[in-house]
Image (cartoon, rainbow, N blue to C red):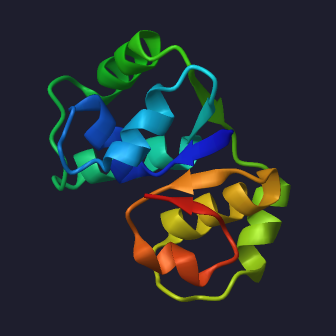
Amino acid sequence: MRYLVDTHAFLWFLNEDITLNANAAAAIEDPSHTIYLSIASLWEIAIKVRIGKLELPQPFGIFIRRQLEINRRLRLLAISIDHLDMTATIPLHHRDPFDHLLIGQALHANLMLITNDSKVSLHPVHRLW
């Protein structure tokens, strides 16, 4: 299986937070699965750190590089025009632009999205939680 990890799921995974659903954690940890992390999620984390909504144990760049080194199986998913084109066509069931982009990426690349956001199910994307 191929998965795209939502920002909150990524952070919960890194922190071994019990909020992360057992099915989601198992999917991320399964070596037979391909796990993607969107550049959009890194952008979202950087913004939240900057505005004080998220605190990391190290500066953003150091923390993210270290986590990607530790979790080598995570593949960064760049943002393409095709992803943005898909994003431009999905209904506005909520207003989070990062979620819209992740949904567009998941739809375009046929990835299952690991997220606890139930509003994602309003879109034709497969969700694991």
Which quadrant of the figure has residue 25?
Answer: top left
- 122 vs 78, left or right, is left
Residue 65 image offset from top left, x and y in percent:
42, 17
Q: Residue at x 18, y 40 (%)?
A: 17
Residue 86 image offset from top left, x and y in percent:
79, 69
Q: Is residue 121 above or below residue 112?
A: below
Q: Closer to the camera, 50 or 19? A: 19
Q: Is residue 80 above or below residue 121?
A: above
Q: Residue at x 15, y 41 (%)?
A: 55
Residue 104 image offset from top left, x and y in percent:
70, 64
Q: Is residue 51 above or below residue 12?
A: below
Q: Residue at x 52, y 14 (%)?
A: 72
Residue 46 seen? no
Q: Quadrant of the N terminus?
A: top right
Q: Is residue 32 above or below residue 16?
A: above
Q: Closer to the camera, 43 or 7? A: 7
Residue 126 seen? yes
Q: Quadrant of the C terminus?
A: bottom left
Q: Residue at x 52, y 74 (%)?
A: 120
- 129 vs 49, left or right, is right
Q: How many marks?
A: 0
Residue 33 image offset from top left, x and y in percent:
62, 30
